[in-house]
């Protein structure tokens, strides 16, 4: 079974080129809509920025 960060990284890897997602969207897709802050922390300690595109995650969409 995967831990929380691994679930988050799997979702972030699926963001297509040219698209973005919010912290809340990532949290919802990872399994818990209350994990928005956990998503932020997980991306802050991103172990592999080359394959986990944390720059595609934004605060909110307008």
Image (cartoon, rainbow, N blue to C red):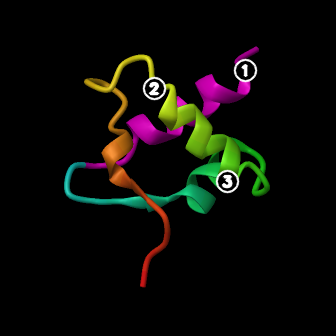
> For the stretch drawn in magenta, what is the main secondary structure?
helix
Quick one: which residue is furthest to the left in this view? 18
Q: Earlier in the sequence, mark 3 or mark 2?
A: 3
Q: Compared with residue 27, is residue 22 higher up or lower down, i.e. above or below?
A: below
Q: Which mark is residue 3?
A: 1
Please provide the residue range marked out in magenta. 1-16
Q: Quadrant of residue 31?
A: top right
- Residue under pointer 2: 46
Dot 2, crowdedness within 10 Å: few (<14), some or many (≥20)? some
Residue 47 on image: x %, y %: 44, 17
* Quadrant in the picture for the N terminus: top right
Q: Quadrant of residue 8?
A: top right
Residue 43 on image: x %, y %: 50, 36
What's the distance in space between the residues labelled 3 and 2, CA to CA? Answer: 15 Å
What's the distance in space between the residues labelled 1 and 3, CA to CA? Answer: 16 Å
Residue 10 appears in the figure? no
What's the distance in space between the residues labelled 2 and 1, CA to CA? Answer: 14 Å
Dot 1, crowdedness within 10 Å: few (<14), some or many (≥20)? few
Label 1: which secondary element: loop
Q: Compared with residue 19, is residue 4 higher up or lower down, i.e. above or below?
A: above
Label 2: which secondary element: loop
Q: Is residue 36 left or right of residue 12?
A: right
Label 3: which secondary element: helix
Of badges 1 and 3, the one in the foreground is 3
Asked if the residue under mark 2 is in contact with the one under mark 3, i.e. CB atoms within 8 Å, the reply is: no
- Residue under pointer 3: 36
Q: Which residue is located at x 32 percent, y 26 percent?
A: 49
Q: Which mark is residue 42?
A: none
Q: Earlier in the sequence, mark 1 or mark 3?
A: 1
Of badges 2 and 1, the one in the foreground is 2
Q: Compared with residue 61, is residue 28 higher up or lower down, i.e. above or below?
A: above
Residue 18 on image: x %, y %: 20, 57
């Amino acid at each position: 079974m995967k831990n929380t960060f691994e679930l988050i990284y799997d979702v972030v890897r699926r963001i297509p080129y040219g698209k973005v997602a919010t912290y809340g969207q990532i949290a919802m897709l990872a399994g818990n809509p209350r994990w928005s802050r956990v998503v932020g922390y997980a991306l802050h300690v991103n172990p592999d920025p080359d394959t986990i595109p944390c720059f595609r995650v934004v605060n909110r969409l307008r």
